[in-house]
Image (cartoon, grey):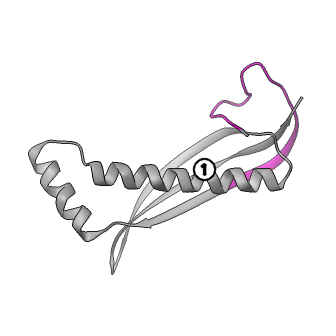
């Protein structure tokens, strides 16, 4: 399935709009990852633990969005927007990634 942040896929035309589709992923941030991320941040390096967690959350959210579009009979999802949010809970921090776009059929 074609996933695009643009309103129309390059070289293709949408023949039908099937509605908004979305996917969300919330991942717990491990306390050990937090500790090592803090050390990395103090030393000025990139936080590999957080980068990996964000990538995993984005992949899960995108897969859920794509599955929702597929269930509608879509060939593509256009106008995709990806949002990232940190959520503080009593148990610690969580990362939320949400993706949404418009499911379309292509001509």
Q: Nearer the viewer, residue 16 or 68?
A: 68
Q: Is residue 58 magenta?
A: no
Position of the N terminus by quadrant:
top right
Identify which residue is drawn at 65% across, 34% down.
Answer: 4
For the magenta stretch, what is the residue range?
Answer: 2-22
Q: What element carries label 1?
A: helix
**Furthest-left residue in this view:** 43
Identify which residue is drawn at 23% across, 63% down.
Answer: 34
Q: Is residue 17 magenta?
A: yes
Q: Locate residue 11 relative to residue 37 in the image: left or right.
A: right
Badge 1 density bin: few <14, some 14–19, many ≥20, Cα 10 Å: many
Across and down, in percent, residue 107 comes to 89, 28
Across and down, in percent, residue 25 comes to 53, 61
Q: Locate residue 71 relative to residue 97 in the image: left or right.
A: right
Identify which residue is drawn at 60% across, 50% down.
Answer: 62
Residue at numbered disc 1: 62
**Furthest-top residue in this view:** 11
Across and down, in percent, residue 17 comes to 85, 42
Q: Find residue 79 and report its image quarter.
A: top right
């Amino acid at each position: 399935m074609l996933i695009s942040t643009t309103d129309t896929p390059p070289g293709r035309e949408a023949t039908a709009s099937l509605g908004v589709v979305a996917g969300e992923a919330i991942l717990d941030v491990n306390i050990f990852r937090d500790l090592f991320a803090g050390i990395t941040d103090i030393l000025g390096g990139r936080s590999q633990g957080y980068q990996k967690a964000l990538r995993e959350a984005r992949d899960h959210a995108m897969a859920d969005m794509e599955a929702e579009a597929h269930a509608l009979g879509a060939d593509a999802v256009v106008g995709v927007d990806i949002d990232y949010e940190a959520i503080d809970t009593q148990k610690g921090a969580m990362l939320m990634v949400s993706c949404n776009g418009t499911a379309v059929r292509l001509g």
